[in-house]
């Protein structure tokens, strides 16, 4: 690492570096073991496998990875690890709506997710299926992580010492938790949820510690009988906030972020971690997603945007770029934000090579390209913006094809071959899908007003005498001159461009017209003008 990069990292205001400096302050000189050896800083993300991975899962792993890479840069390469932790020892509380074979799950309500048959019939359990989906999901995006299963740790006894620690500090934990609960809940609350030896359910019952060192507790089983039983070796699951604290201490977690809805959990789990002899990790509390109406996204309402939907209409880089920006501010998450995110990503990427190092560290693309070991590839410039592509396919209509779009790109792009421009080719496919589903159904070209018709005729006349080698800038200048001509009575240039968008493209917004005419072709643009003038 160069001195300039190291210096810039120390003062960068980019949020991953601000987070990384929290960790560096926690471990001056790096994290060390008892012998003084440098050991990895542990980053963690959590996942509840009662459902499939979603955009929230992606954003948490991505953002944590960005902080991890910033810390490595800040410290000159101190070692790090990222654990993706699956809380698959949880008891199933309700059957997800998107499961077809619900009867399998309904028969096992209350059982640990890893001990319920897989309704899809492909894995050892429901949790194993969803864990496999998580790992495939993270692998798809190239994340560097270690997968850890709660069930594996509980069942193998690897959390037994931590469970004994909870039993030894029972009253101190109760003193933290009980004031936060409703009166009715206090009567049944227990930091430890025993697994019934009768039917295997995770029980929400009062528990009495009999022998902390032996791991023995007393509780009422499903039969109504009061029994004494071990909580070790997979015979219990800790309550959520206690479990989170125990995990931080047992695994030695140094950094974990979470959503705003878990703010209270962070506070209480942090206090419990201290009781257990550990320390709350550093972390960022990020804002939640909103839909296009500004309402909180809810799985039950179905008002969110899935990662599959984003990737159908936009690139994974654009999703990462959108999630990078200001995590402490609430974000709207709907299809309408995708085109702008795509184009802004490429604008920042194009700027990157020319920026001094201190500006590079504030460029989202610098962080995104390093998140998972980017090693170079296609150039740093997209020859056509996504917005312009959408305008092109909008004019071509819902039945436009990939080959047809590329034939028009030949007017504008040097070496217009999909193989030479794979990123652009991917956006062509996505633009066709976006146009089919969202643009084509809404396009309505209006008839021009009298003054607008005169201006369109003037534009047609000017285009008729343009030379074959006219550039997009030449064409843009002609458009400007006509719009500024007082004979056509436009109050502002914006009114003239609005006329072009609404009469030629059928949309309230549009591209630089010079670029559009160069892409669509002068002859084809003249046909659009003729159609507009014909009403």
Image (cartoon, rainbow, N blue to C red):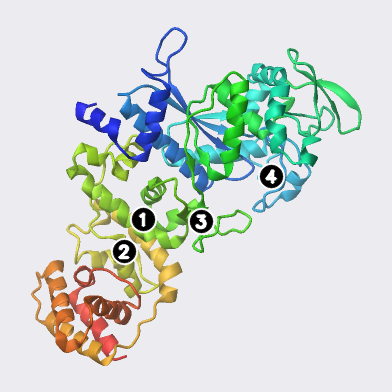
Q: Secondary structure at mark 3?
A: strand
x 82%, y 27%: residue: 197
Mark 3 surroundings within 10 Å by alpha-carbon count, few (fewer than 14), some (14 through 19), many (20 or more): some
Q: Earlier in the sequence, mark 2 or mark 3?
A: 3
User: Disc 1 and disc 3: Cα gap in Å?
Assistant: 16 Å
Mark 2 surroundings within 10 Å by alpha-carbon count, few (fewer than 14), some (14 through 19), many (20 or more): some
x 69%, y 23%: residue: 172
- Can residue 367 be seen at all in this image of the molecule? yes
Q: Are marks 4 and 1 in contact (CB under 8 Å)?
A: no
- Residue 366 locus on image (x, y percent): 29, 40
Mark 4 surroundings within 10 Å by alpha-carbon count, few (fewer than 14), some (14 through 19), many (20 or more): some
Mark 4 or mark 1, whichever is nearer to me: 1
Q: Secondary structure at mark 2?
A: helix
Mark 4 or mark 3, whichever is nearer to me: 3
Q: Secondary structure at mark 1?
A: helix
- Can residue 149 be seen at all in this image of the molecule? no
User: Disc 2 and disc 1: Cα gap in Å?
Assistant: 10 Å
| Residue to which mark 1 is pinned | 341
| Residue to which mark 4 is pinned | 119
Q: Earlier in the sequence, mark 4 or mark 3?
A: 4
The answer to which of 433 and 259 lies nearer the viewer is 259
User: Disc 2 and disc 3: Cα gap in Å?
Assistant: 24 Å
- Residue 444 locus on image (x, y percent): 39, 81
Task: Report the side of 275 relative to 198 (left or right).
Answer: left
């Amino acid at each position: 690492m160069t001195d300039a990069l190291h210096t810039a990292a120390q003062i960068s205001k980019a949020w991953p570096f601000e987070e990384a400096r929290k960790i560096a302050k926690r471990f001056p000189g790096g994290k060390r073991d008892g012998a003084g050896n440098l050991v990895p800083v542990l980053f963690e993300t959590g996942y509840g496998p009662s459902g499939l991975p979603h955009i929230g899962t992606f954003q948490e792993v991505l953002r944590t990875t960005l902080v991890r890479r910033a810390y490595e840069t800040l410290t000159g390469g101190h070692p790090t690890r990222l654990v993706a932790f699956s809380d698959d020892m949880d008891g199933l509380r309700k059957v997800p709506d998107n499961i077809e074979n619900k009867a399998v799950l309904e028969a096992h309500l209350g059982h640990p997710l890893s001990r319920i048959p897989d309704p899809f019939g492909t894995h050892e359990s429901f949790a194993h299926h969803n864990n496999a989906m998580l790992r495939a999901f993270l692998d798809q995006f190239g994340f560097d992580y270690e997968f850890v299963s709660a069930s594996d740790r509980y069942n193998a006894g690897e959390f037994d010492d931590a469970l004994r620690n909870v039993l030894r500090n029972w009253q101190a934990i109760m003193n933290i938790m009980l004031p936060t609960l409703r009166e009715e809940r206090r009567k049944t609350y227990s930091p430890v949820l025993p697994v019934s030896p009768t039917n295997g359910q995770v029980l929400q019952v009062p528990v009495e510690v009999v022998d902390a060192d032996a791991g023995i507790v007393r509780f009422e089983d499903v039969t109504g009988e009061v029994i004494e039983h071990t909580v070790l070796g997979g015979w219990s699951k800790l309550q959520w906030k206690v479990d989170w604290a125990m995990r931080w201490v047992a695994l030695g977690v140094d950094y974990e972020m979470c959503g705003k809805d878990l703010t209270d959990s962070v506070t209480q789990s942090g206090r419990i971690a201290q009781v257990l002899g550990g320390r709350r990790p550093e972390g960022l509390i990020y804002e939640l997603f909103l839909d296009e109406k500004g309402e909180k996204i809810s799985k039950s309402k179905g008002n969110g945007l899935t990662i599959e939907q984003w990737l159908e209409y936009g690139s994974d880089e654009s999703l990462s770029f959108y999630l990078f920006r200001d995590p402490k501010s609430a974000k709207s998450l709907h299809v309408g934000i995708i085109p702008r995110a795509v184009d802004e990503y490429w604008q920042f990427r194009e700027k990157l090579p020319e920026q001094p190092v201190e500006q590079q560290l504030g460029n989202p693309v610098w962080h995104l390209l390093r998140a998972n070991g980017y090693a170079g590839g296609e150039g740093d410039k997209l020859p056509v913006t996504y917005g312009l592509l959408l305008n092109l396919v909008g004019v071509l209509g819902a039945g436009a094809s990939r080959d047809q779009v590329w034939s028009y790109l030949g007017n504008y792009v040097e070496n217009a071959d999909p193989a030479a421009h794979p990123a652009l080719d991917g956006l062509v496919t996505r633009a066709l899908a976006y146009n089919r589903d969202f643009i084509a159904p809404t396009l309505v070209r209006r008839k021009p007003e009298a003054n607008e018709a005169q201006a369109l005729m003037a534009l047609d006349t000017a285009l008729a005498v343009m030379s074959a080698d006219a550039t997009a800038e030449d064409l843009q200048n002609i458009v400007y001159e006509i719009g500024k001509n007082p004979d056509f009575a436009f109050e502002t240039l914006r009114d003239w461009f609005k006329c072009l968008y609404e009469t030629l493209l059928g949309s309230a917004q549009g591209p630089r017209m010079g670029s559009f005419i160069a892409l669509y072709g002068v002859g084809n643009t003249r046909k659009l003008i003729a159609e507009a003038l014909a009403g």
